[in-house]
Image (cartoon, rainbow, N blue to C red):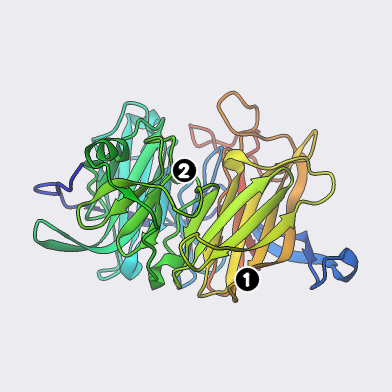
Amino acid sequence: MGAFPAQGQAPGAPAQVVDYEPPTRIAKYKVTKFGRSASPRDDRTSKAKFRVAERTGNCCENYVTADRDGTLYDLGGSYVNFTNDSGKTWQSVRPIQPLVNGEGSLAVAPGGDIVAVEWDPYSGDHLMSYKYTAETKEWQYLEAPLHTPFYDRPWLTVVPGPFTIRGEEVPYISFVDGYPHFGTLLYSTDGLTYTQTSDPSIDQQIDAEVVRKLPIKADPDLDWIQPNSQSPIVPLGGGSALAPPGLFSDAWSVLNPETLTWQAVELDTGELSGRYMVDSKGRLHNLKTIGNNFEYGISLDGGRTWKSATGSLPKGVASMGGMTVDFRANAEVGIAAVGMHVDRGPTDGDIMFKVDISSNKPRVIKRYEIGLGDIDAASGVGQDIRFDFETLAILPDGRVAISFLDSTTGPIYSLTETASDRLGPALAIEL
């Protein structure tokens, strides 16, 4: 489906930016620093200090990202909450009308902009977009009326351009997709107005051409605009993006930046599998989970050849996978981070790895055991205690913020904004 920019795009309304005081505390968690050898004899264990911030998301998840200035953002719930000092103080971006219990996602955009989308069915079916414009230093919001009746957890991805659409140049476009995934994406050319549609499955039926090589291009913004790895769209640089099969079509798809249509991709060097990110150097990163191990790979030639490293979970951890794994790769910082909510048997826990990507051969350097790992928390409606997906962000100095859940992370707020005895996830911000 081609690009049809929205006509008469409505301007966003000024958002309120208010002080917010979530409960915070300092905690220390186990960290294992791996030696150079394959033997555990030169591994060292210690304690790492974190600031724990609660109630910046909602009952079941957080959604974090960070910009190159070190600001950490969370839109796990109805509002964009952010901190400029590693969780000491927070501010909250809010529309005029009150929201009750939303969930959303957000992303850094080129030029320092921030775009976000949340869906709140409890206050009258509000799909709300937020945008911070770096040039004016203003936050705006706008009601987005076009969506399916059920639009749970909208995933958001920014694809940097520039794009020329009907004679107008825009620096980026942002795609949003709500669950359940019916195949049609909404996208915006202004970061606020989501009335344009895009569908990889339809495009592949119209255009039978198959792409044999991923069109990856280096871009300094790619270190910071990476979405949660659950998002169905991954920016590749140069105006292109990658979409996985299953959600929209039977084949992987790549976005043609000239036409804003999707084409099937079948690499001539093997099948695509796992999760992907592209960093600012134009390197392709891949994460695959197998049992209680993961394989982390870097490719300099678009997936033709790889250099890989393997990470292992601590003893007593049964498995990982599904919605509970996330990762980022930041070439500017020289660090990749892998986070996961794992099965420990009767209870679950949260594990984070740091991977040295300062060279083209990755090396797993640290493993963090975040929280107490003493609660059985899983994803999905019907669970007594929910942890729906993992999320993490890399800060400019190499520190990482990650969501986790244990017996200390609560109580959460209920729909009426009063304290509930139910446990919920929190953020652990490395200090």
Residue 409 appears in the rendering: yes
Vertical placement of residue 425 versus 64, above or below: above
Q: Position of residue 18 (x, y in %)?
A: 40, 56
Mark 1 or mark 2, whichever is nearer to me: 1
Q: Position of residue 402 (x, y in %)?
A: 61, 55
Q: Position of residue 360 (x, y in %)?
A: 58, 73
- For image coordinates 60% across by 60% down, the residue present is 297
Q: Earlier in the sequence, mark 1 or mark 2?
A: 2
Q: Any mark on residue 77, and which?
A: 2
Q: Quadrant of the C terminus?
A: bottom right
Secondary-structure class at tag 1: loop
Between 209 and 333, the one nearer to me in the picture: 209
Q: Is residue 222 left or right of residue 173?
A: right
Residue 95 appears in the rendering: no
Q: Residues within 10 Å of mark 2 (few under 14, many from 20)?
A: many
Vertical placement of residue 70 versus 197, above or below: below
Secondary-structure class at tag 2: loop
- Which residue sits furthest right? 41
Q: Residues within 10 Å of mark 1 (few under 14, many from 20)?
A: some
Q: Any mark on residue 40, and which?
A: none
Between 345 and 27, the one nearer to me in the picture: 345
- Residue wearing tag 1: 361
Q: Is residue 400 left or right of residue 221?
A: right
- For image coordinates 87% across by 64% down, the residue present is 40
Tag 1: amino acid: Lys
- For image coordinates 90% across by 68% down, the residue present is 41
- Which residue sits furthest front? 268
Quarter assignment of residue 34: bottom right
Vertical placement of residue 333 versus 105, above or below: below
For marks 1 and 2, give the CA distance: 37 Å
Q: Position of residue 286 (x, y in %)?
A: 55, 56
Q: Is residue 308 left or right of residue 240?
A: right
